[in-house]
Image (cartoon, rainbow, N blue to C red):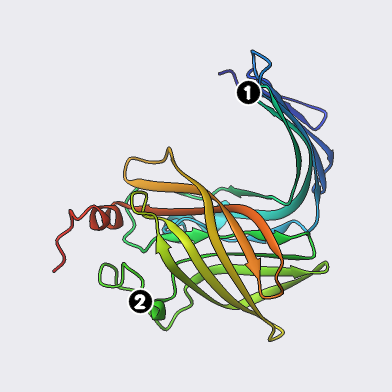
């Protein structure tokens, strides 16, 4: 496919996708129409959190990326409203997805011997938004406990944050406990997260996958995307993406093709 066209804060591709930034960092319109016209969408996403910076996501980025490259990334929750036509059937869209980007990160595609990493964004009507990326807490007896050697004195998350009523706070502690795995895809399908912010407030979230698929990735890497139903300790419910990734050592272990010494 030809390279996208850029003009006046608008990106257009030859396969029918159009992205127009109505207000940089705050508001964007996304449109798509398939060639047969049976599938299309027209949505407007408006920010409900600031555009927050992040460090790294994939294990190994910190080992190969040089500071002079000025690497980084960002995350932001959006309120998405619009319409979807899927195979001729109409759907109304009203949800709170997250958008994220990484830049100038060096990903060598070499295997990194590391536990599965989970990225778990969620936003409850824009009033409480939370995200973290990291592996399961060692004290939860993760299934990979005897497969990887980790420093239990260090945090199990790379970074995490919460925005409550428009105020962003750092998360200083995360305890993610996977209580059920998919039997074939091996990713978490039920999990609990406990997090504490820098003001001492503790949050509890419980999630269950309602859809899941393995998406294309590097030959030695597995990438799972899913939709999770999340609830918090106040009884609120939301839906958002949950992503998990790992390298060949974990995959071989789950396929019973790894000999542990």
Q: Quadrant of residue 215?
A: top left
- The residue shown at (44%, 68%) is 178
* Nearer to us in this view, 188 or 237: 237
* Residue 155 x %, y %: 48, 77
Q: Is residue 48 left or right of residue 12?
A: right
Q: Report crowding for label 2: few under 14, some 14 to 19, many 20 or more residues within 10 A (C-alpha).
A: few
| Image-based side of 3 in relation to 117, left or right | right
Residue at (43% x, 68% y) in the render: 179
Residue 18 visible in image? no
Determine contact: label 2, label 1, CB under 8 Å.
no
Q: Residue furthest bottom?
A: 200
Given this view, does label 2 or label 1 mark the residue nearer the observer? 1
Relative to 174, is 118 above or below?
above
For the C terminus, the image quarter is: bottom left
Q: Is residue 114 left or right of residue 86?
A: left
Residue extending furthest top? Answer: 36
Q: How crowded is mark 1: few (under 14 residues within 10 Å), some or many (20 or more)?
A: few
Which residue is at a point 67% across and 55% down the rendered structure image? Answer: 75
Residue visible at 70% across and 69% down in the picture: 162
88 over 233 or under it: above or below: above
Which numbered tag is attached to residue 258?
none
Image quarter hosting the N terminus: top right
Give the residue number, with chain letter if any, for mark 1. Answer: 87
Quarter holding residue 4:
top right
Residue 163 in percent (x, y) is at 75, 68
* N-term mark: 2 or 1: 1
- Outermost right residue: 23
Q: Is mark 2 on a helix, strand or loop?
A: loop
Does residue 21 lie above or below 176 as drawn? above
Residue 194 appears in the rendering: yes
Q: Which residue position is annotated with label 2?
A: 141
């Amino acid at each position: 496919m030809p390279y996208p066209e850029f003009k006046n804060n608008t990106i257009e591709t030859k396969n029918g996708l159009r992205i127009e930034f109505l207000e940089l960092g705050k508001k964007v319109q996304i449109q798509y129409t398939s060639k047969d016209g049976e599938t299309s969408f027209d949505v407007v996403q408006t920010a409900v959190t600031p555009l927050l910076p992040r460090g790294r996501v994939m294990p190994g980025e910190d080992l190969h990326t040089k500071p002079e490259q000025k690497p980084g990334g960002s995350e932001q929750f959006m309120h998405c409203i619009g319409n979807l036509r899927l195979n001729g059937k109409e759907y109304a869209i009203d949800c709170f997805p997250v958008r994220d980007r990484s830049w100038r990160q060096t990903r060598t595609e070499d295997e990194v011997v590391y536990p599965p990493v989970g990225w778990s964004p969620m936003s409850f009507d824009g009033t409480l938004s939370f995200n973290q990326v990291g592996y399961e807490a060692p004290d939860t007896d993760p299934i990979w406990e005897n497969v990887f050697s980790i420093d239990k004195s260090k945090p199990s998350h790379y970074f995490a944050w919460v925005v409550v009523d428009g105020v962003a706070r750092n998360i200083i502690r995360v305890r993610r406990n996977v209580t059920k795995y998919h039997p074939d895809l091996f990713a978490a399908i039920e999990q609990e997260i406990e997090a504490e912010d820098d003001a001492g407030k503790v949050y509890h979230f419980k999630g269950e996958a309602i859809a899941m698929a393995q998406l294309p990735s590097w030959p030695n890497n597995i990438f799972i995307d899913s939709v999770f139903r999340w609830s918090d300790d106040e009884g609120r419910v939301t839906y958002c993406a949950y992503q998990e990734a790992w390298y060949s050592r974990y995959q071989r272990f789950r396929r019973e093709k790894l000999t542990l010494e």
